[in-house]
Image (cartoon, rainbow, N blue to C red):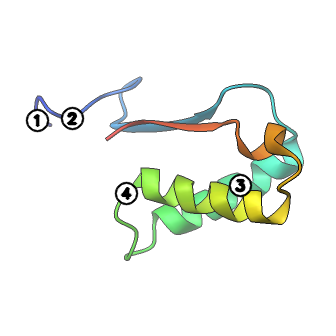
């Protein structure tokens, strides 16, 4: 690992939420995120999270307390 890489709790990247979220949405978001993050055409975990949050936001735009909670830290 180079000096330029961030490490959060032993991992180069971490995804979390800023507040408690409904487990149904969290389950779907987690599955969609990992499916996207492990795809060969995804440049980074941040891109995968961004894609999934935008998808959730399009589906339920009037409920930002669900889709705005997700954050990515790291490289």
Whichever of callouts 1 and 4 sits on the residue coming sooner in the sequence is: 1
Instruction: Tell me the element at label 3.
Output: helix
- Give the CA separation, mark 4 to mark 3: 16 Å
* Disc number for residue 44: 4
Residue identifier under label 2: 5
Q: Is residue 24 left or right of residue 12?
A: right
- Give the CA separation, mark 3 to mark 2: 26 Å
* Disc number for residue 71: none
- Give the CA separation, mark 1 to mark 4: 17 Å
Q: As rendered, which of 40 and 48 lies closer to the eye?
A: 48
Instruction: Tell me the element at label 2.
Output: loop
- Give the CA separation, mark 4 to mark 2: 13 Å
Cβ–Cβ below 8 Å for labels 2 and 1?
Answer: yes
Whichever of callouts 1 and 3 sits on the residue coming sooner in the sequence is: 1
The percent position of residue 44, horizontal first and vertical second, equals 37, 57
Instruction: Tell me the element at label 1.
Output: loop
């Amino acid at each position: 690992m180079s000096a330029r890489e961030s490490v959060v709790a032993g991992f180069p990247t971490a995804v979390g939420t800023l507040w408690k979220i409904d487990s149904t949405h969290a389950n779907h978001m987690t599955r969609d995120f990992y499916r996207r993050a492990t795809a060969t055409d995804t440049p980074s975990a941040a891109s995968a999270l961004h894609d999934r949050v935008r998808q959730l936001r399009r589906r339920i735009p009037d409920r930002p307390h669900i889709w705005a909670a997700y954050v990515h830290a790291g490289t």
